[in-house]
Amino acid sequence: LFDEEGKLLGSASSPIQIWKEGDCIEQSSTDIWHAVCSAVKAACSLAKIDGEQVKGIGFAATCSLVAVDADGSPVTVSWSGDSRRNIIVWMDHRAVKQAEKINSRNSPVLQYCGGSVSPEMQPPKLLWVKENLQESWSMVFRWMDLSDWLSYRATGDDTRSLCTTVCKWTYLGHAHMQHINEKDSRDMETCGWDDDFWEEIGLGDLVEGHHAKIGRSVAFPGHALGSGLTPTAAKARNFELGLVAGTPVGTSLIDAHAGGV
């Protein structure tokens, strides 16, 4: 928790659960949300700041892949079938073969991510789920980077971060910027997805509905989302944040990038 001059007023942490079985490493979005809420309330308490004094909040997290259904409930990405395990963690390496398959296509998109995708990026992980967990694949309504999911959970706004999508999803940031410059606006309509890329690698269904499952809108980090915190996310009881409904929420950053800032 920082003041307007950047002075650290308070910080807190809360443990989170992780499952590791070979190359498969998984977490729970529900568990992480509970930990975030606990840490936010603890940081405010240590700083002797009440929720009404907090003027804004933003989320940073690992580049992990979150799967939820149309109701926002978790969808398993685990061989175990445990619905709690709905996050493929960034360092998970189950999708090595899928990454090799994608790289063999030599898509022009790859020149914008160092010439190849890694199994730690989202397209190989998505392809792995489609090839191995068909029931889960059919149930998922939104695939999200963890930091974007936290913003979505807090606001109900499905807008994705330019940081997460460019770095881990092959979203073309230069196309996004060209679109903005041509329109002389900060229109958040997605224009950086390369539909041919997704078709070529066997994930053409993610293009449907104007990319509804992977992001219809993309915004600059810090852009205010929706109407701020929803009443549900803000409330102090149970596993929520203990802040005020309507508190501004900024578009997210990847954790390492936030650390750089």
Image (cartoon, rainbow, N blue to C red):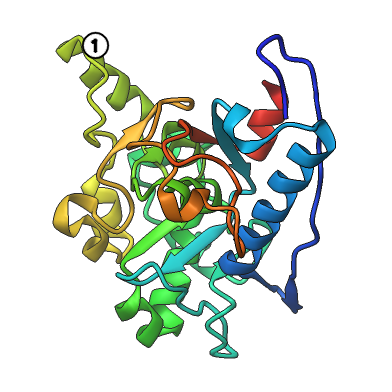
Q: Nearer the viewer, residue 17 or 57?
A: 57
Quadrant containing the C terminus is top right
The residue closer to the viewer here, 129 or 5, is 5
Instruction: Tell me the quarter of the image containing the N terminus.
Output: top right
What residue lies at 61% left-to-right and 40% top-to-bottom?
60
Residue appearing at x 26%, y 30% in the figure: 188
Q: Residue at x 81, y 49 (%)?
A: 13
Q: Secondary structure at mark 1?
A: helix
Residue 26 percent coordinates (x, y): 65, 71
* Image-based side of 68 in relation to 99, left or right: left
Judged left or right of residue 26, residue 98 is: left
Give the side of residue 157 with respect to residue 114, left or right.
Answer: left
Q: Give above or below for 167 relative to 100.
A: above
Q: Disc 1 marks which amino acid?
A: Asn
In this view of the protein, can residue 96 be seen by the observer? Answer: no
List the residue tagged with mark 1. Answer: 181
Can you tell which quarter of the image residue 46 is in?
top right
Image position of 146 with respect to 50: above or below: below
The residue lying toward the viewer, choosing from 150 and 10, is 10
Residue 111 coordinates in the image, percent (x, y): 44, 34
Residue at (64, 56) in percent of width and height: 90
- Among the 4 quarters of the image, the one containing residue 183: top left
Vertical order, 103 against 170 (above or below): below
Residue 150 visible, this angle: yes
